[in-house]
Amino acid sequence: MVKRSGTTRARSESRRGASPSSRGDVTARVKKIIAALKRAHPDAKLALDFSSPLELLVALILAAQCTDAKVNEVTRQLFKRYRRARDYADASQEELEEQIRATGFYRQKAKSVRACCRQLIERFDEEVPANLDDLLTLPGVGRKTANVLLGNAYGVSGIGVDTHVARLSQRLGLTTQTEPDKIEFDLNATVPRKEQVKFCHLLQYHGRRICRARRPDCPACVISPLCPFPEKTLEEPKKTVPARSVWLG
């Protein structure tokens, strides 16, 4: 008996989970969601600052359990000091730890960055691969990091499932899955390929500004009519001023 990999099972479950007609309905709703969010967040883009695939790769490794703003603050000086994969690989563990300490988990991140850059030197002539399979062989690189890098550095369509993309896609009824890989496969089936990278940016901005985790601002949400989320927040009751003061009788 041949065992199927987790990735193969996820693809099969995703295919079984939606009939062609229901998938077509979801895709039509996704297109409306994208159009509305583009109008609401015209500035939506990747929040990490970078000027090359290598810089984005390093920034994504540092972004684990850290805010994008803090990563940008750290990489502003880091990218001036380390310009090539060899610069990171040749740096001592202690030196790199000190440079990235503010991002948290700096020991493991420094190990991942140095090991990743050594692989780039040994296997890819210091170039960051432009395909998913090769990226996934690098230390510190998972599917989210690989898809975000491919989409934003190389213009390759793909879904990078971060916390915002996962949470909003669940609230919007685009997936019932909780594992990032399975969410990715569900979204791949319904989000038009040419819109996938932008779709992720839009969900990230909407998740930060409106559809927050603890208390989503549903009254201010432009896609509320397209959202089946059952626990929508209600508008605060308006305080009315009595026509006559209660103290005057």
Image: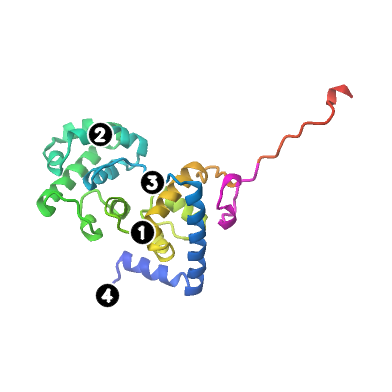
Mark 3 or 2, nearer chain start: 3
Q: Which sits in the foreground, 177 or 205?
A: 205
Residues at marks 2 and 4, CA–CA distance in whole angstroms: 45 Å
Q: Residue under label 1, please give it.
A: 181
Dot 4 amino acid type = Val
The type of residue carrying mark 3 is Lys
Residue 136: horizontal and vertical position, in percent? 24, 56
Looking at the rendered image, the quarter that the C terminus falls into is top right
For the residues bearing labels 4 and 3, Cβ distance under 8 angstroms: no
Label 3: state its secondary structure.
loop
Q: Is residue 247 left or right of residue 161?
A: right
How far across and how far down the image is residue 63, in percent?
32, 41
Q: Are marks 2 and 1 in contact (CB under 8 Å)?
A: no
> Which quarter of the picture shows residue 16?
bottom left
Residue 85 is at least partly visible in this image: yes
Which label is found at residue 100? Answer: 2
Q: Tell me the amino acid under the disc marked 1.
A: Asp
Mark 2–mark 1 Cα distance, whole angstroms, equals 28 Å
Q: Which residues are magenta?
A: 219-235
Residue 90, how many percent across, how many down? 11, 38
Characterize the local packing of mark 1: few (<14), some (14-19) or many (20 or more) Cα atoms within 10 angstroms. Answer: some
Q: Which dot, 1 or 3, sits closer to the camera? A: 3
The numbered mark at residue 45 is 3
With respect to residue 216, does 248 lie above or below? Answer: above
Is residue 60 shown in magenta?
no
The answer to whether residue 122 is left or right of residue 41 is: left
Give the structural element (helix, strand or loop) at label 2.
Answer: helix
The residue positioned 31% from the left and 51% from the top of the image is 152
Identity of the residue drawn at 50% across and 65% down: 28
